[in-house]
Image: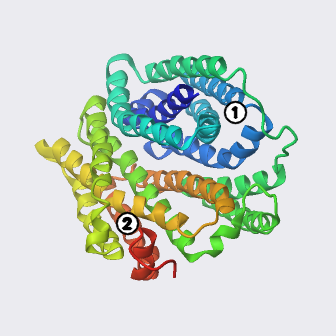
Amino acid sequence: MVLAFLSAMALNGLDATIITPALPRIASDLGAGLDHITAVEWSFLVAAGLALPAAGWAGSRWRPAWVLACCSVVFALGCAVALAAPVLEVLVAARALQGIASGLMVPVGLVMAYDGATGSDRLRIARWTTVPLTLVPMVGPLLGGWLTQHHGWRSMFAVLLVLAMVVALTTWWVGRDGRATDPAARLDAIGLLLVGGAILLATIALPLSSSSLPLALGCLVVAVPVAFLARRWCRRPGRVLDLGVTRLRTFRAGLVTTALCAAVVNALLCAVPVLLVTRQGHSTTEAGLVLAAESLGVLLGARLVGSAQRFGVRGWVLASVLATVPCVVVALLGGGRWALPTAATGLALVGILLGQPTMLGQVMAFHGLAGEQMPSATVLLMGLRSVASAWGVVAVSLTLPHPGAALWCAALTVVLVLALLLPVGRVPAATWAATVGDGPGPA
């Protein structure tokens, strides 16, 4: 069971990082503009975020191993379609299909891995999960850049297709004796459609604004009442999302903080390789090497989180946010012969610094929650983080076709970074301290 879960996590992490260095080459081959090619990324992220609320239902209604195997097959189908995609629209649809499967994989796999595990087993599983969580994000960009440069971008989907089928077969084999925990579970389809519709309309409005402003405004006009209906619907018990946890200030602050961090990071990871390849003539392999530096930074930053208690948690987070601003500028505006090391250094520092509010924001979000609130809080946190990542990619994509793209990207990303000061600063220092066990409790 654990092997199947780790394989699914590795596949999911690889797919999330392998594509980005190839975006300029995909745009060139399919004749797409730089502002449109990013749909390959944000369609995956939005679909993954929208599928998350259905994971609990699917894992209860059927055997978790069977659900995970089916998701792997659907993922493989998306890879096959992407492998043969003749136009951008087909590739985007294939990526959305992959995103739906990916959004279900990790939560269902987590249930399968921890089912019946003892305390020592859970600790062992948690230790093993650090392997795909730390290694895959570093390997993904390197592999994607190298494959694209030497074998074409379609080879990435061939690799993912093979890996997905291996995960499907492994999961089916190890979990064939499992059972469903609640075969009578029902899906809140209305709530899922309302929430998904509102998010999808809001997401596509921004890229549409560059080609058809009336259509973009129309999407926003429709999205507002749909979001209102979704909010009212989800207030009832037993719905696809339990919004009751959003009444807690600590959860709201942690939720917004982690979402903004995800938007900033994914905006950078989208913009940097595109600028390096299209504006400065570097190879996709070099772009992938630069992107791997951000994952290394996150890994190093995780070792610094413990220092927050020593210097004051809120002050530590605010200082990390402010220090991120020059690093963003360095990552995006460095050029000439030092462009690669400059961009890599900037991204590594962003990974270290933004890792602080990301990790401490997650701790803040779950601080003071009751046990029965944890599943809903987890779905909201993971789902909004995925959607916010997509919105960061969408926002930065609008700047890429312009002559001063690097400057516009830097300005936009800096604004997103500074926006972090609002949720962080509004929570009292004592509450931040309490979230990591250095204070009396939630404020």
Q: Residue at the location (57% across, 31% down)?
A: 91
Which element carries disc 1, helix, strand or loop?
A: helix
Q: Is residue 22 above or below residue 192?
A: above
Q: Residues within 10 Å of mark 2 (few under 14, many from 20)?
A: many
Q: Would you say residue 272 is visible in this rendering?
A: yes
Q: Would you say residue 212 is visible in this rendering?
A: no
Judging by the rendered image, the residue that carries numbered circle 1 is 64
Left/right placement of residue 168 relative to residue 255 reads right
Indicate the quadrant where residue 213 lies. Answer: bottom right
Q: Residue at the location (36% across, 75% down)?
A: 314
Query: Could you tell me how many numbered marks the image carries?
Result: 2
Query: Residue 417, labelled with which disc?
Result: 2
Q: Where does the image place residue 290, in percent across and percent down from the top left?
A: 26, 40
Left/right placement of residue 323 relative to residue 341 reads right
Q: Give the CA distance from mark 2 to mark 1.
A: 38 Å
Q: Where does the image place residue 15, in percent across and percent down from the top left?
A: 48, 33
Q: Residue at the location (25% across, 49% down)?
A: 348
